[in-house]
Image (cartoon, rainbow, N blue to C red):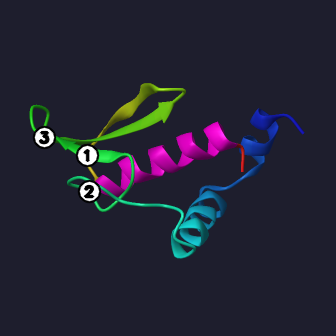
Amino acid sequence: MPLQARLDSLTLAQIEAKFREAGAAGTVFSSGSSQHRGVGWHKGSEKWVAQLRVNGTNIFLGCFKEEDDAARAYDAGAFWKDGR
């Protein structure tokens, strides 16, 4: 099944559950000012920023008012990148 079809068939709850499982297994780590991987606080905009690193390049996923929204964007991007 193509990656886009796999992503389209998943609900947000299914994606979040996968990342919770990975975190419980110790494969997801947090760093910086956020409790979530790939999420940091941008002082200038006073918003949470989500970024993903792909092949040595940072991919900007967006700015969010809520930290959890930025974490969801990172989770979806990481899921897209890894295809798991």
Which numbered disc, 3 or 2, marks the residue that appears first in the sequence? 2
Q: Residues within 10 Å of mark 1 (few under 14, many from 20)?
A: many
The residue that appears at 20% across and 41% down in the rendered structure is: 47
Main SS type for the magenta part?
Answer: helix
Name the side, left or right, on which 24 lies relative to 66.
right
The amino acid type of the residue labelled 3 equals Glu
Name above or below for residue 5 compared with residue 32: above
Q: Is residue 70 magenta?
A: yes
Label number found at residue 34:
2
Name the side, left or right, on which 75 lies relative to 44.
right
Name the side, left or right, on which 46 lies relative to 61.
left
Disc 2 to disc 1: CB gap under 8 Å: yes
The residue that appears at 72% across and 51% down in the rendered structure is: 84
Q: In the image, which is nearer the foreground, mark 1 or mark 3? A: 1
Name above or below for residue 16 compared with residue 32: below
For label 1, the residue is: 40
Q: Is residue 41 magenta?
A: no
Quick one: SS at disc 1?
Answer: strand
Magenta-highlighted residues: 67-82
Name above or below for residue 59 compared with residue 14: above
Label number found at residue 46:
3
The amino acid type of the residue labelled 1 equals Gly
